[in-house]
Amino acid sequence: MSLYTEGKDFKGLNHSAQTLPKGEYEHCTFTGCHFADGHLSNYTFLECTFVDCDFSNTHLGNTAFRQVFFKDCKMVGAHFNECNSFLLEMSFEACLMQLASFYSLPLGTCRFHHCQLPEADFTEANLSASVIRNCDLSQAVFEQTNLEKADLRGSYGFTLDPELNRVKGLKISKDSLGGLLAKYQLHVE
């Protein structure tokens, strides 16, 4: 039988020293917790909040994130593509997510605000109607990505090929037009 925890606050937990018991966590808050290089495989988080936590290189095999909010978290190299995609819903604010992988995930309900996403992989992800506002997308990979009606206004540094991605209704800032035209080697001023 799996452990069920509701409404608990976790502060300063170091998962490598004191393992978070495997189970289902609902309406819990995690503040200043360290999960880096750890295993959170097969955990379920429902309507939880993570603030100032480190998930760098954390194993997320079959982890369920349902209506989960991450703020000021470090998630370098996190493989979200290994998560359980059923009812996946995450929001990120001011998170460092360099080299994160979202390969082939349904991310239409996801929100990214003021995040650092350099070299993140969005290959084959469904970002339709998602919001990725004011984010650094330098060298992020968009291939066969559904970006229809997505909102990338204020985001910068990205290059994506409209012929290799679905972009109908995509919202971007005028300053980002060069990222859509890069393959044509045009100089937009």
Image (spheres, grey):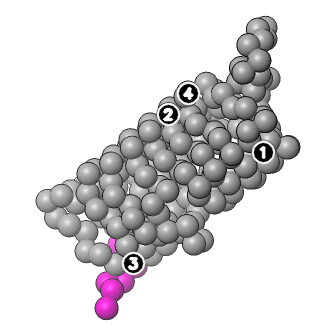
Q: Per the image, is 5 magenta? A: yes
Frontmost of labels 1 and 3 is 1
Residue depicted at x 69% and y 45%: 144
Residue that carries the numbered disc 4 in the rendered image: 138
Image location of residue 67, percent across then percent down: 56, 66
- Magenta stretch bounds: 1-8
Q: Secondary structure at mark 4?
A: loop
Q: Secondary structure at mark 2?
A: loop
Residue that carries the numbered disc 2 in the rendered image: 119
Who comes first in sequence, dot 3 or dot 4? Answer: 3
Q: Nearer the viewer, residue 160 or 107?
A: 160
Residue that carries the numbered disc 3 in the rendered image: 24
Q: Tell whether label 4 touches label 2 (CB within 8 Å).
A: yes
Whether residue 61 appears in this view of the structure is yes
Kindly report the distance in space between the C-alpha atoms of the residues bearing marks 1 and 3.
36 Å
- Whether residue 103 sits left or right of residue 126 in the image: it is left
The type of residue carrying mark 4 is Ser
The type of residue carrying mark 1 is Arg
Residue depicted at x 63% and y 52%: 125
Q: Per the image, is 78 magenta? A: no
Is 77 situated above or below 116?
Answer: below
- Whether residue 131 sits left or right of residue 1 in the image: it is right
In the picture, the disc for residue 166 is: 1
Q: Mark 3: give few (<14), some (14-19) or many (20+) Cα within 10 Å.
A: some
Whether residue 48 appears in this view of the structure is no
Q: Nearer the viewer, residue 30 or 155?
A: 155
Q: Tell whether label 2 touches label 1 (CB within 8 Å).
A: no
Q: Secondary structure at mark 3?
A: strand
Q: Mark 1: give few (<14), some (14-19) or many (20+) Cα within 10 Å.
A: some
- Whether residue 183 sits left or right of residue 105 in the image: it is right
Who comes first in sequence, dot 1 or dot 3? Answer: 3
